[in-house]
Image (cartoon, rainbow, N blue to C red):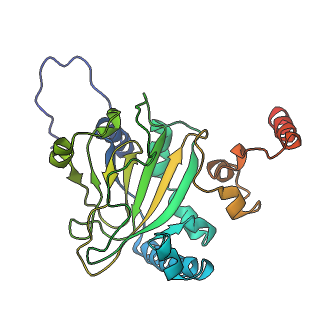
Amino acid sequence: METFPARYGVKKQTRSESRIDRAAEMIRLLGYAVVNGNYSSDDMSCFSTAFDRALASTYERHGGREALVDIDEHNTIRAPLAIDPLFLKLALNADILSICHQLVDEYVVLNQQNGTINPPIGQAYNQAAFHRDLPYQHFVSSRPLAINALFCLDEFTSENGATCVIPASHKQEDFPSDATALASQVQICAPAGSYIVLDCMLYHMGGVNRTDRPRRAVNHVYSVPIIRPQIDLPAALGPDYTSDPDVRRLLGYDVRVPTSIEGYYAKRARQLNG
C-alpha cells in the first residue's frame, strides 16, 4: 500500500507521475538523483570490454600511460564515443535525455563524454575535490544550464569512492562554509548500470577508493547549446559519424562556429531554406 507523508496547511503540491518525473523533481530539489539505465547483463559486459579497450587505445594513441601521467590524464578517456561507437548508446539513453529535456530544454547538446577511473588503494585522483561541472562559476539560474549523467560501469560503494555531493548547493552562489560542507555532504551509492544524475552546479567530488580495484564510470554533460563544449565532437568524430538528424543535433553538428564569413553566410542560408 502506498503511503503519504503527513502534512497540514498545504495548498499546492508538485505532481510527479513517473519515475522520470520523480528523478527530475529530486534534481530540482536536492540537485541529484539515481536513475536505472535499464541495460542487460550482456550490455554491461560489452560496455566493460569497450571501456578497457578504449583506455588501452588512449594510451597507445597519446604516447603511452606515462606520458598521460605527466599531464594527469591517465585516469580519463576523452570522448570515448570517438574511439568506439558503442559509447554513443550510453549518451543516447532515452530516460536521461527525457530528464535533460524536462530540466534544461528540448534542445540540448552533448557538451562532453569522458571515461573516468577512480584508482585503487587510495591513489591520488584529480576529481577528489569538490567542484561544479561548470567550474569557476558562482551564480544560480532559474533552471539548469547543464546536467551531468555519470554512468556507473562498476557499482559505486562507500569503499570504492562513490560520488559525494553537497545537497541543494546548486541553489547557492557561493561554496558553503567548511563546517557546513563537511556536515551536509552525502555519498551516493549506486548499482552498476545506473546513472548518477546531477545539476551541473551542484558541488560534488569523487570519494577515496580504498579497494584493490579501479572504479570505472562514463561521464556525460548535456548543456544548452550556447556553452562551449569540452571537445569539438563533430571535428573529432568526422562529418559522416551519423546521418540521424536528432543525433547530429545532440552531438553539436548544428551549432558549430563558422570559421569564415563565407561559412557564416552558408550556414545562414541553410537555416533559412531549411
Residue 266: percent from left, percent from top: 87, 41
Of 248 and 62, nearer the camera is 62
- Residue 190 vs residue 87: left or right? left
Residue ranking furthest to the front: 70
- Residue 48 vs residue 205: left or right? right
**Which quadrant of the figure contains the N terminus?**
top left
Residue 57 position (above or below residue 7): below
Give the residue drawn at x 24%, y 66%.
Answer: 157
Residue ranking furthest to the right: 262
Q: Is residue 16 something one can see in this rendering?
A: no
Residue 254 position (above or below residue 218): above
Rendering quarter of residue 37: bottom left
Give the residue drawn at x 14%, y 17%.
Answer: 9
**Which quadrant of the figure contains the C terminus?**
top right
Residue 254: percent from left, percent from top: 71, 45
Give the residue drawn at x 60%, y 72%.
Answer: 84
Of 175 and 229, nearer the camera is 175
Of 155 and 77, nearer the camera is 77
Q: How many marks?
A: 0
Give the residue drawn at x 74%, y 63%.
Answer: 238
Residue 241: percent from left, percent from top: 71, 63
Q: Is residue 184 something one can see in this rendering?
A: yes
Residue 190: percent from left, percent from top: 28, 61
